[in-house]
Image (cartoon, rainbow, N blue to C red):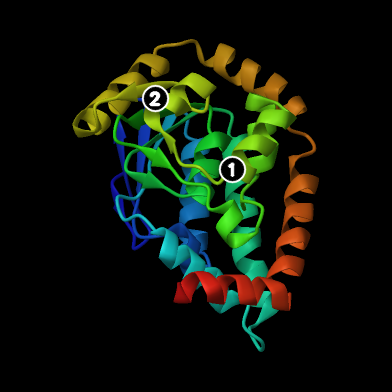
Amino acid sequence: MPQEHEMFSATQIEEVAVIRFKGNLLFQFSDLYLKEALFDHLHQVSHGRDIKVILLFASPDKIRRQEKIQFFHDLSQPGVDVKRVTRIFNAVNQLILMIQKIQKLVIHADTGEVGSLFMNVSLACDYRVIGDKTVFQYPTVELGLVPKGGGVFFLSRILGESKTLELLLSGDDVDAARALELGLVNQVVPSAMLEVSAIEIARKFAQKPMRLITGVKKLQSLISKDLPVFLELENQILLEAIASERFRKRLNKHLTD
């Protein structure tokens, strides 16, 4: 089962499929070949009879705030191919929905500076373990954009509507201790031990009855039945925002300050 792709690497440890992302998803999703390779592999492991748990390790290459601002600044310029922008957003939607539909336990592991998109990928998973040096960044105020990837949907389920609004309008970073307190993650471990700890957690979950895992996930899928519609509306809100002159001026100001 070991595989190496430009976008990810994959191995299997007993009944755990381990996928390690490489590079930056946000930039890579405009490449049809890379996207399809990832989705094909996720489909394969999600139907593997000898797999109970899928463990996703986030890429160690993090996108910095300024890089994210520059990315959206470039997308907002006159003459930019709107179809390309939509394709990137749709790829994010596809990944989020695929993770939600997998009838196996999906664990996400991450550490370091984590942007909103990658936090949302994590929130789509069933269980989240992070290193103690993790900082979640929501530059929603700087960008003037809702976070892509179902952030408002997932955060509202965990925190409630009022707390979600407070978090996103504050623009404040959330460290590991605060994330655990808020219920955004399930476990915090020393960052240096993240890989070992996450694999051990995944192996313990793999010992649970498979019928119990799939039964719980099927019932939970009813709660998320509106997620596809939500993600489509999220696309519309984002596309309208980045097409505006006010948005370009906001990002120009942040890039020149």
User: Does residue 116 appear anywhere in the picture?
Assistant: yes
Among the 4 quarters of the image, the one containing residue 23 = bottom left
Looking at the rendered image, the quarter that the N terminus falls into is top left
Where residue 89 appears, as percent x and y from the top left, is 63, 61
- In the rendered image, the vertical position of residue 41 relative to residue 210, given as above or below: below
The residue located at (63%, 23%) in the rendering is 217
Secondary structure of residue under mark 1: helix
- Say the numbered circle drawn on residue 170: 1
115, 128: nearer the viewer: 115
- In the rendered image, the vertical position of residue 118 relative to residue 49, given as above or below: below
Left or right of 98 in this view: 185 = left
Question: In the current view of this chain or complex, which residue is farthest to the front?
Answer: 257
- Say the numbered circle drawn on residue 162: none
Where residue 6 appears, as percent x and y from the top left, is 34, 63
Q: Which residue is mark 2?
A: 177
Looking at the rendered image, the quarter that the C terminus falls into is bottom left
